[in-house]
Amino acid sequence: MLKTNQWSYWERKEILEEIDLVIVGAGIVGYSTALAFQENNPTAKILVIERGLLPSGASTKNAGFACFGSASEIYDDIQSFGEETVWKTVELRWKGLQALRNRIGDKGLKLHMNGSWDLFTESEMDTFEAVSPQITYYNERLEEITGERNVFSIDSDVQQQFGFNHIETSIYNRLEGQIDTGSMMTRFHQLVVSKGIHVLFGCEVDSIHEKENGAVLHTHLGSIESKKVAVCTNGFARQLLKEDVEPARAQVLITKPIEGLKINGTFHYQKGYFYFRNIDNRILFGGGRNLAFEEETTSTIATSERIMYALHEILSEVILPQTAYEVDHSWAGIMGVGSVKKPIIKHISPSVYCGIRLGGMGVAIGSLVGEELAKMISTNEE
């Protein structure tokens, strides 16, 4: 591939020179930042650079859940982080989903509001007994956030309805849904290009340094200078910045089409550490990071035998116990997590900003993080 110093006069003039903002990362946050910044600064020259041929993080590798928090996750998080912190996070996720819908459109997202179920096995009934008395209160708080009443309800017929095994009961969330991740990111890219924003794939940033009136990005293709830089690489951010964010690998598999599949919706299992859904008459199933936190704190994009074995086991024994299936393929994506479930939207140095640490909720909050980051860059607010 050509180095930046080998580019023609036309390429330099159109893409490399007099850049107002370089955004590192062509995912949900990066594209949202580019679009929002362009709206605030219509004449700005914006360049998005991405190290992979496709987005390298979780934006094109996630499970496609339009979710903001199962009842057991909210309960668990309140014990760890406190009441108001958790509800502020839930509100951020809800508003972020609305921002995503406004940006991409439900048609572009291929959004299906089939609801979600928080599943409980016999061994998890202690958790259910702790969570279920909180449903009325949770619904009151969610009504304040969403304007919708009775979001959560108990559904004890979920096993019979979908043919599961070992599921005692569930808590249903009627406001969660499914999206098509590929369609979403295709639409994002189309919007970015339509606004005259350039995107360079296969350009990896090694380091960023301040210079007079801007910053220089050192890439494996050469140096790129810009007045401002926004790092939107989420789980890979520690490779460029010293911030409280660690990579968290998520592994996913998908079956081949299953004739007569009656599972329809999104499902949270074991406090959301496992999750599955239907898509194109298939089951998409991921998670298991809780089985090996240390090993899964990695930016290596590969599946592991341990996690894949657990996914196959649950798929056979719990999700499709009476159904023959074949796994089509599997993959991994890298999320960004930290000590708290709150994104980092920060002015790091005179010319460098970041929008990172999405906490496994990039679909829900990525658009809003990008919009807030773009506003910060435009106004130079801390």
Image: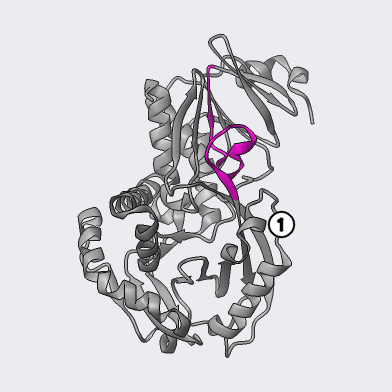
Residue at (69% x, 34% y) in the render? 204
Magenta stretch: includes residue 39 = no
Q: Residue at x 37, y 23 (%)?
A: 381
Tell me where the magenta segment starts and ends, as one range.
227-247
Relative to 376, residue 322 above or below: below
| Residue placed most toward the observer, 265 or 93 | 93
| Residue 6 spot, x, y in % from top left | 78, 19
Does residue 68 appear anywhere in the picture? no
Residue 230 on the magenta segment? yes
- Residue 165: percent from the left, percent from the top? 51, 87
Q: Is residue 343 visible?
A: yes
40 versus 255 height, above or below: above
Reading the image, the residue beneath label 1 is: 302
The residue under label 1 is which amino acid type? Ala
Pick whichever, 217 or 327, lies toward us.
217
42, above or below 158, in the image = above
